[in-house]
Image (spheres, rainbow, N blue to C red):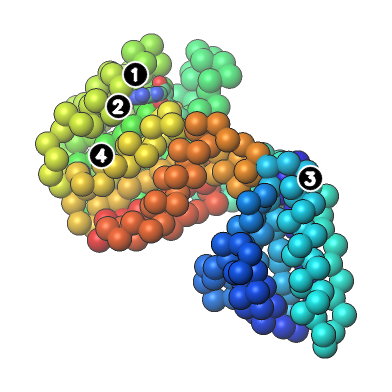
Amino acid sequence: MPLSTAFIATERPERYVKQLISHMGHKADAKHTGVGRGTIAFRSGTCSLVSSAQKLILIAAAADLDSLNGVQDVIARHLLRFATQEELHLTWSDPKPGDAVEIVAPVVDDYLRAHCTPPGELLDKLAETTREATGRAAGMQVAADEGALLQMLVRLSGARRAIEVGVFTGYSSLCIARALPADGYLLACDVSSEWTAIARPYWERAGVDDRIDLKIGPALDTLRALPEEPAFDFAFIDADKGNYPGYYQEIVPRLVPGGLLVLDNVLLGGRVLDPAFQGDDHRAMRRVNETLAHDERLDVVMLPVRDGVTLARKR
Ligand SMILES: C[S@@+](CC[C@H](N)C(=O)[O-])C[C@H]1O[C@@H](n2cnc3c(N)ncnc32)[C@H](O)[C@@H]1O
């Protein structure tokens, strides 16, 4: 239960952020991460500090409850000591695990979903067929609003040549392929012949099957076999999370300048925020998120769409 937040009313949020970062820098890895923001990383956990209008927000995270209490305690003691000119009221929320974090409030989420261009009969039918044929695995399919986002991004970027890693039953492939021009090309990578077999008839009905080159096999092998030269305008990664660092590493050199890389599930249901989750997938996703944000070759924005979507445009 390792995440906890505190909202503290104050006229001086930025000043407290500066004081905490500067003071704690002697004992921990404390740094500014933007104007009025910072993080303090202790051995036992971290605290993010965010100043906003008349409010200081603290977000403490640790791998277990004892460590979380330790982080909360050290931050609270120092903060209250710095507040010589006002009385601060600091109450931490009950700890909750990262996977209980709501990425978007349900009421907003519902409104967002209801106000995107509807997917249309063919995509709706593919979603239904997928549910019938794959049961619980159908949850892997991108949702209608994310499909609409992919189409929008492909059209806006004017992409002609695209890569998809993670086809499943072909919903996102269909969204990407039909946004490409008639002579467009989508290299679609997956390991499953069974799941991708469901996709084919839908690609045919949409009249885009001639644009889609389906390669069955580990996507890393497929990507590594491509010439290492910038030949693709768009790429979408939505496959096994442990290989995200490898996919990103192989795809970026193959994107043209201005090309767009889109990564799905970058929040892993909130687990990336929570240090208690230390599986291979969690660690790989944290690594790729961190590396992308500081990659000099890219401009990057992370969006709270579904399970988190990162857009990375090659400079
Ligand atoms: C989340 S699903 C993709 C969903 C798809 N984008 C959609 O909208 O329906 C992940 C897919 O990645 C595939 N996959 C898993 N490991 C893979 C690998 N090493 N190489 C290629 N594909 C892989 C799985 O077979 C699965 O179809």
Q: Are marks 3 and 4 in contact (CB under 8 Å)?
A: no
Q: Earlier in the sequence, mark 3 or mark 4?
A: 3
The residue tagged 2 is 219
Q: Is mark 2 within 8 Å of ligand 1?
A: yes
Residue 280 x/y as whole percent = 50, 31
The Cα–Cα distance between marks 1 and 2, rounded to whole angstroms, is 7 Å
The residue tagged 3 is 66
The Cα–Cα distance between marks 4 and 2, rounded to whole angstroms, is 10 Å
Q: Please tell me in which quarter of the rendered image ligand 1 is found.
A: top left
The residue tagged 4 is 250
Q: Residues within 10 Å of mark 3 (few under 14, many from 20)?
A: few
Q: Earlier in the sequence, mark 1 or mark 3?
A: 3
Q: Are marks 1 and 3 in contact (CB under 8 Å)?
A: no
Tell me the residue at 37%/29% (across/down). Answer: 166
Q: Amino acid at mark 2?
A: Ala
In the image, residue 110 sits, relative to residue 81, either above or below, namely: above
The Cα–Cα distance between marks 4 and 1, rounded to whole angstroms, is 18 Å
The Cα–Cα distance between marks 2 and 3, rounded to whole angstroms, is 42 Å
Q: Amino acid at mark 4?
A: Glu
Callout 3: helix, strand or loop? Answer: helix
The Cα–Cα distance between marks 3 and 4, rounded to whole angstroms, is 41 Å
Callout 1: helix, strand or loop? Answer: loop
Q: Is mark 1 within 8 Å of ligand 1?
A: yes
Q: Amino acid at mark 3?
A: Asp
